[in-house]
């Protein structure tokens, strides 16, 4: 074996290693898969069922499954009142005051490593819950895609898309789906999966 052959072989191996390392580096720097972030009242009110699955959560889980995304939940530090009417009143008060309720230590998901974020919440007074506003304040969403899905009692998206565009001018807001609470409760898993799949297909 000549010295010239050994030198060429070593050089070839070195170039191959550089190529592999470059590919690994590029992969590591690329955005990870999407994240699905949601807020559900069921887990954020006194007496709520922490092990139950709320309407918004149910849709969030289906989106995460179909998009192979990381599922994350927004949780408040101070739970909302146990009754619906009390929560409705408090939700309106928070909206009027542009409040920022504190989030629980395990309820403030970090999406800094994700480019595409699916964000779900119930329609509260035609807008998004202020807990969602608190969460957004702590994130850098500039240049990201925000895909919103909403549960509601009849108001569909309400003003939420416009208010999100105003609050996040450098984030691209996409509407995914708005599902009536009653309809969501009436769907079996297969029907919900088909509904979500049809909505996601519209984004392509």
Image: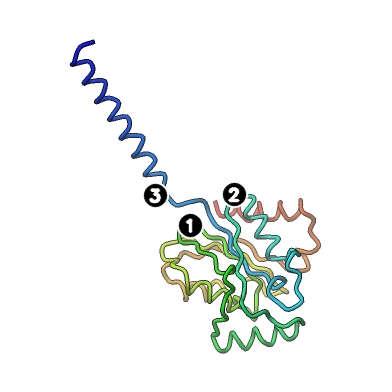
Q: In this view, does 23 lie to the left or right of 163?
A: left
Secondary-structure class at tag 3: helix
Report, in whole angstroms, how far the alpha carbon at label 1 lies from the one at label 3. Answer: 11 Å
Numbered badge on residue 57: none
The crowd level at tag 2 (other Cα within 10 Å; few <14, some 14-19, many 20+) is: few
Where in the figure is residue 49, as x and y percent of width and height? 76, 69
Q: Residue at x 60, y 58 (%)?
A: 71
Secondary-structure class at tag 2: loop
Asked which quadrant contains residue 109, the reply is: bottom right
* First along the sequence among labels 2 and 3: 3
Secondary-structure class at tag 1: loop
* First along the sequence among labels 1 and 2: 2
Furthest-left residue in this view: 4
Report, in whole angstroms, how far the alpha carbon at label 1 lies from the one at label 2. Answer: 13 Å
Q: In which quarter of the image is the N terminus?
A: top left
Numbered disc in front, either 2 or 3:
3
Q: Kindly identify which residue carries mark 3.
A: 29
Q: Kindly identify which residue carries mark 1.
A: 114
Q: Is residue 65 left or right of residue 99?
A: right
In this rendered view, identify the residue nearer to me: 112 or 184.
112
Where in the figure is residue 198, as x and y percent of width and height? 66, 53
Q: Kindly identify which residue carries mark 2.
A: 68
């Amino acid at each position: 074996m000549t010295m010239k052959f050994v030198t060429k072989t070593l050089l070839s191996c070195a170039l191959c290693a550089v190529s592999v390392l470059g590919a690994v580096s590029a992969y590591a720097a690329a955005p990870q898969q999407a994240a699905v972030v949601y807020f559900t009242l069921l887990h954020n009110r006194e007496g709520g069922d922490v092990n139950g699955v709320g309407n918004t959560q149910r849709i969030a889980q289906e989106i995460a499954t179909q998009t192979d995304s990381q599922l994350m939940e927004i949780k408040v530090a101070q739970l909302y009142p146990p009754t619906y009417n009390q929560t409705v009143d408090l939700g309106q008060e928070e909206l009027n005051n542009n409040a920022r309720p504190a989030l629980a230590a395990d309820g403030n998901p970090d999406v800094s490593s994700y480019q595409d974020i699916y964000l779900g919440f119930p329609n509260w007074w035609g807008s998004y819950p202020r807990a969602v506003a608190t969460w957004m304040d702590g994130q850098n969403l500039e240049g990201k895609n925000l895909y919103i899905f909403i549960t509601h009692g009849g108001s569909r998206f309400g003003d939420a898309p416009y208010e999100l565009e105003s609050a996040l001018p450098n984030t691209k807001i996409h509407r995914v789906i708005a599902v009536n609470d009653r309809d969501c409760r009436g769907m079996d898993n297969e029907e919900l999966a088909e509904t979500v799949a049809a909505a996601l297909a519209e984004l392509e």
